Each structure stands twice: as C-alpha cells, then as structure tokens.
Amino acid sequence: MKLSEILKREYVKTAILLAVVVVSVFAFWIGLTTALKTEYPMLAVASGSMEPTLYKGDLIMVQGVSTGYDIKVGPKDSAEPGDIIVFHRPTDPSELIVHRAIDKELRGGTWFFQTKGDANFSPDSWELAEDHLVGKVVGHVSHIGYIPLFLREFLWTPIGMILIVALLLLFLFYDYIPLPGKKDQQDAP
C-alpha cells in the first residue's frame, strides 16, 4: 500500500470524525436552545456580583421566559427570594448581566424590574424593561464556566487562534512527525 493511499484514508477518517463532532455539538446546542426557549441556554458567570449564590466561573443554565409575569421578585434573604435573571444591560445591550430580580411593576402593559447582585450593596441604577430579559437561571455547575471564559478571553485573540490552528495541525499529523524514540509501524516485528 502506498503512503499516499494511507494518508488519504487516515485523513478521510479524521475529517469524518471531526465532522461528526462538529455536527453533534451544533445539534446539542440547537436542542438546548429549543428546549429552554432562549438563544443563551448556558452561560458562564463572569463576575463576583452574585456571590455567594453564584461565583465567577460557574456555568449557569438559563430558561427563557415569555413575559415578566413569570419572574418571581424579592431580596435574596427573604422567605421567597426573587429569581436570578439574565438580561441585556440597558446601557449596553451587547453585555449580558446575571442579577436577582428584587422588585417589579406593570406599567402600560410592560413589566419593569429592579435588579441587584447578591454581593452588591445597592440595587442597580437602571430600570429594566421586560424586553431586555433573556431568561431566568434554573441551574448551575461550579467551576465549569472557566472553560468558556478562558476561550473568550484568550483563545479568540489572534495569538489564541494561531495556537488553535497549530494544535489542530499537530493532532492531525502527529503520526507522521518523526520524533526521537518513536518507531514506525513498519519497523515493528
């Protein structure tokens, strides 16, 4: 068998495996967004404003809400604390915030919320309209959120992208890189 035929076969196998992994990840994400009815079903907590309830690096699961009526409100120390909600920051809609809903009011058919981070001394300075809501937190896993935080803060930079490409190439062609002490399969008895 020629080396070029072997390379083609191994390359094809690797490409198929990679395609299956990519399709599986997208199918999983689409399934989550459909089941939880939000475009952001999982997020990493990026600050300590919700400590001790949620810590930086926690991975949260978010369920979409149809209206502000579905959100419970109340301080964290009350008998029934309010829901922890995810919303677009009113002053910068590109930023997502995770804080507790402590009060709400219906005005002109729209719910408006007062929010506060559990670790913050005072409520947030903005008034949050329900159209900024992403959803409410329905679960979390400690420390797993550091992975997406690392990816966002380092790997999506030019240096990080070069590192990703180099590691992928190394993975794909590892069997064909001559290393000291590494025996070829043809040399084996």
Image (cartoon, rainbow, N blue to C red):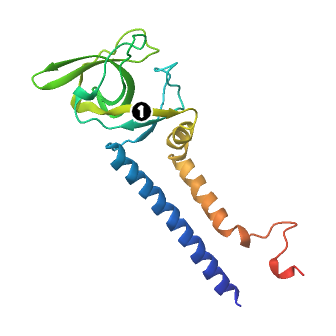
How far from the left and from the top, in percent, is residue 71?
Answer: 29, 26
The number of numbered discs placed on residues in the rendered structure image is 1
Residue in front for this viewpoint, 165 or 19:
19
Q: In the rendered view, does 129 fall on the left or right side of 74?
A: left
How far from the left and from the top, in percent, is residue 25?
Answer: 47, 56
- Quadrant of res 120: top left
**Residue at far front of view:** 79
Residue in front for this viewpoint, 40 or 69:
69
> Looking at the figure, which quarter contains the N terminus?
bottom right
Q: Is residue 173 above or below residue 32?
A: below
Q: Residue at x 37, y 41 (%)?
A: 40
Q: Residue at x 40, y 27 (%)?
A: 98
Q: Residue at x 60, y 53 (%)?
A: 163
Q: In the rendered view, does 171 fall on the left or right side of 29?
A: right
> Looking at the figure, which quarter contains the C terminus?
bottom right
**Residue at far right of view:** 189
Q: Is residue 88 above or below residue 164?
A: above
How far from the left and from the top, in percent, is residue 112?
Answer: 21, 21
Q: Is residue 134 above or below residue 176?
A: above
Q: Which residue is mark 1?
A: 138
Q: Residues within 10 Å of mark 1 (few under 14, many from 20)?
A: some
